[in-house]
Amino acid sequence: MDRRTITIVAITGIVALVLVGAAAAYALRPTAAPSGELTAIPVLPSAVAQQATAAPDQPAAAEGSLVFEIDADQSEARFLINEVLNGADKTVVGVSNAVAAQIVIDPASPADVQVGTVQVNARTFITDSGSRNRAIQNLILQTNVYEFVTFTPTAYSGLPASIAVGDTFSFQITGDLTIRDITNPVTFDVTVTVESDSRISGLATTTIDRPSYDLQIPSVPQVASVEQTLILELEFVALAQ
């Protein structure tokens, strides 16, 4: 190998090391803090009242409706994804309790339920690894630009005819899930328990594909592979307002 070839190889190696170092520094830089306290987007009463227009001889759903809001202190948004880390299978779990949404329910007419936009502050997701947290926020979710993951419901199915304290029921919510600047329709399977007149709890879950949201996982030596799908969950407690 002549001197010119050796020089080219050396320069190429140095450039590669600089680029790798720059990428690592970018991924592991301090993450952006939440911009402020997260509050629920109100569900307009008129949106609920519109549900009753098909039966004018019946009272509007809004008249008997109860307004609930998710209690962040007792709720948790999660993502779960499988990977092979250091040669062993691992399920990575990211959690955040920075979640907000308003729910309007008429116990006598659950089909008229209205769930407001569900917001999760992506800057608050944490896993069991600080370096992974920074990579998720800085590279994958780009939370310095896209602070929130949101879900806006558009349709409900499988709701019971009526509900009472002590009931547990399951249904589905379809809506638009936005991660960064990409929005796709998804359907959550939801189970809710009516614990009292002023408290409901439940779990909503769905599975999404990473490619649908262009969720690129940084290549690191310790991680051999990461699954293409991930599970999203919202375990919530909502309190009457």
Image (cartoon, rainbow, N blue to C red):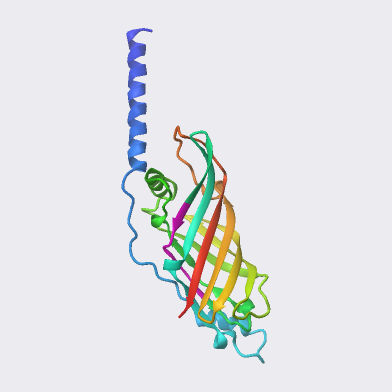
**Residue ID at (47%, 65%):** 75
Which of 69 and 18 lies nearest the eye of the viewer?
69
Could you tell me how many numbered marks the image carries? 0
Task: Give residue 34's position: percent from left, percent from top.
Answer: 34, 59
Quarter the C terminus occupies: bottom left
The rendered magenta stretch, by its main secondary structure, is classed as strand
Quarter the N terminus occupies: top left
Which of 129 and 5 lies nearest the eye of the viewer?
129
Q: Residue furthest top?
A: 2
**Residue ID at (37%, 17%):** 9
- Does residue 32 appear in this view? yes
Q: Which residues are magenta?
A: 94-103
Task: Give residue 143's position: percent from left, percent from top.
Answer: 39, 53
Compared to residue 11, the image places residue 190 above or below, namely below
Task: Give residue 200's position: percent from left, percent from top.
Answer: 53, 74
- Does residue 43 appear in this view? no
Compared to residue 30, the image places residue 61 above or below, namely below
Q: Is residue 3 left or right of residue 120?
A: left
